[in-house]
Image: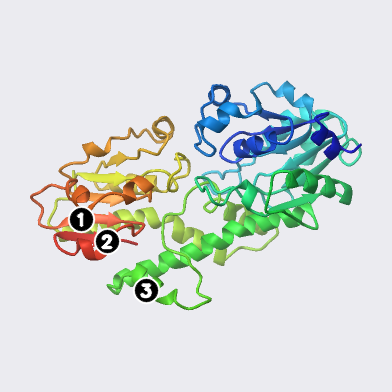
């Protein structure tokens, strides 16, 4: 009986190392089919899961309450499992070089609790070669076991889109890979238990790693192009959204829009690829150019706001400005790697301390990471300018009357910065200086 059959029969368990926005939904999905040990170093997070609370809002408290995942912060419990999935973040350092500390730490902990006959599958986004060249030596050193003899490895890049209730683990084709055909077959069968859309068997681990890192690099470059177009069209006094709607009538026009590029994937993964390319003697031109444009958009929005305040004869220093939305994307509580903070900081350089409102965000996380305390929507009154930065569904429901109530009534022209283009610009022609990317 192989490992797959033992998992299905309940003789063996699967472990999930890292229970964040990616790992937790994977653990819950597998727990519907097989026995799962869910491990995370964060004891507070584990306590919430054990209490039936979902701090990520990815699957919901009701599902967490009823899941059979055995949540634990005790790394020794990993010894109970034979199939391990590592889903920890892979951020970048301040100098944009890869920070492999989380994946190295996870490999170290897992290695200390690895048993013979195990398969370890990494899901963290990395540059090609990390799994075999960095993670495997750590696993071998800590376990005293030999890869290929005592345990096997695979790689299956995560494709979960936080906050997205349509494109989920079950509905997105899963790339899988293994160090040999036997391992690949087992990894594929295990993931097929939960991925309804099926799996794609990559020919090697490095191919799977590369496929993941270029997915987000491609999106980053396309969004950078839209952001550059937005800057150009603003100088021409042309509405970018109107241009894109017109161009979108062609069958092969790509449907991208300008915006702030934050989060843990699109704004991070390209740096992993360019780092490896640079190490091999090739300096990226297109990828890094796109990164520079996207990284600069927060400053561009802030400068545009200041220009609009000047146009309406409102004093810049000490201006009352509200920012609606702080998370890195809509309908998601995660504030890590949000680019809205760039707007906030840049406005601070002009003597403006914005009021920030985000009913969807993790308030404790924002205060810990950025020192920002959120205000309530009803606190947004007598403002000189309002920036709608994130397309939360709650903000989409704001009426024209709601918007008007945010401003100082004395202003003849209300400065409204609609970054995502959520509202109908025609409704804000009278009495507003309406601006959008």
Residue found farthest to the left = 410
Foreground label between 3 and 1: 3
Residue 313: where, in percent of width, then height? 12, 57
On screen, residue 87 versus residue 364, left or right, reads right
Q: Secondary structure at mark 2?
A: strand
Taking the image as drawn, is residue 191 in sight?
Answer: yes
Closer to the N terminus: mark 2 or mark 3? 3
Residue 213: where, in percent of width, then height? 64, 55
For mark 1, what is the residue?
415
Q: Residues within 10 Å of mark 1 (few under 14, many from 20)?
A: many
Q: Is residue 38 above or below residue 324?
A: above
Residue 316: where, in percent of width, then height? 18, 50
For mark 3, what is the residue?
243
For mark 2, what is the residue?
435
Label 3 – label 1 distance at C-alpha: 23 Å
Q: Quadrant of residue 32?
A: top right
Scheme of colours in the image: rainbow
Circles 1 and 2: CB distance less than 8 Å? yes
Q: Residues within 10 Å of mark 3 (few under 14, many from 20)?
A: few
Closer to the N terminus: mark 1 or mark 2? 1
Residue at the spot 74% in from the left edge and 45% down from the top edge: 191
Q: Is residue 360 above or below residue 252?
A: above
Please tell me which residue lies in front, 49 or 266.
49
Q: How many numbered marks are there?
A: 3
């Amino acid at each position: 009986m192989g490992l797959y059959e033992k998992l299905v029969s309940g003789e063996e368990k699967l472990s999930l190392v890292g229970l964040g926005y990616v790992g937790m939904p994977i653990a819950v999905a597998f727990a519907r089919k097989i026995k799962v040990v869910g491990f995370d170093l964060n004891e507070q997070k584990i306590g919430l899961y054990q209490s039936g609370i979902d701090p990520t809002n990815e699957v919901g408290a009701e599902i967490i309450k009823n899941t059979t995942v055995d949540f634990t912060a005790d790394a020794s419990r990993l010894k109970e499992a034979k199939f391990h999935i590592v889903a920890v973040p892979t951020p970048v350092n301040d100098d944009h070089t890869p920070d492999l500390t989380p994946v190295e730490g996870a490999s170290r902990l897992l290695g200390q609790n690895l048993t013979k006959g195990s398969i370890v599958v990494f899901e963290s986004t990395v540059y090609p070669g990390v799994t075999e060249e960095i993670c495997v030596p750590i696993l071998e050193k800590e376990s005293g076991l030999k890869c290929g003899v005592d345990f096997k490895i695979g790689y299956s890049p995560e494709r979960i889109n936080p906050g997205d209730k349509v494109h989920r683990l079950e509905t997105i084709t899963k790339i899988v890979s293994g160090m040999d055909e036997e391992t690949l077959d087992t990894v594929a069968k295990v993931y097929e238990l939960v991925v309804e859309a099926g799996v794609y068997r990559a020919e090697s681990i490095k191919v799977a790693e590369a496929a993941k890192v270029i997915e987000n690099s491609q999106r980053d470059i396309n969004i950078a192009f839209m952001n550059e177009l937005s800057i150009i069209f603003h100088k021409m006094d042309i509405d970018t959204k109107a241009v894109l709607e017109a161009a979108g009538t062609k069958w092969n026009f790509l449907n991208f829009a300008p915006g702030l590029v934050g989060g843990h994937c699109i704004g991070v993964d390209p740096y992993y690829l360019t780092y490896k390319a640079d190490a091999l003697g090739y300096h990226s031109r297109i990828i890094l150019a796109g990164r520079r444009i996207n990284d600069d958009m927060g400053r561009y929005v802030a400068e545009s706001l200041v220009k609009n305040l000047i146009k309406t004869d409102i004093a810049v220093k000490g201006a009352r400005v509200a920012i609606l939305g702080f998370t890195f994307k809509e309908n998601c509580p995660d504030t890590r790697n949000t680019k809205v903070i760039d707007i906030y900081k840049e406005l601070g350089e002009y003597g403006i301390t914005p009021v920030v409102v985000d009913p969807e965000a993790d308030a404790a996380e924002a205060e810990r990471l950025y020192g920002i305390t959120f205000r309530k929507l009803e606190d947004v009154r007598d403002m000189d300018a309002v920036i709608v930065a994130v397309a939360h569904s709650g903000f989409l429901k704001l009426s024209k009357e709601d918007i008007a109530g945010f401003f100082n009534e004395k202003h003849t022209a209300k400065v409204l910065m609609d970054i995502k283009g959520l509202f109908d610009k025609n409704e804000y022609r009278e009495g507003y200086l309406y601006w959008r990317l």
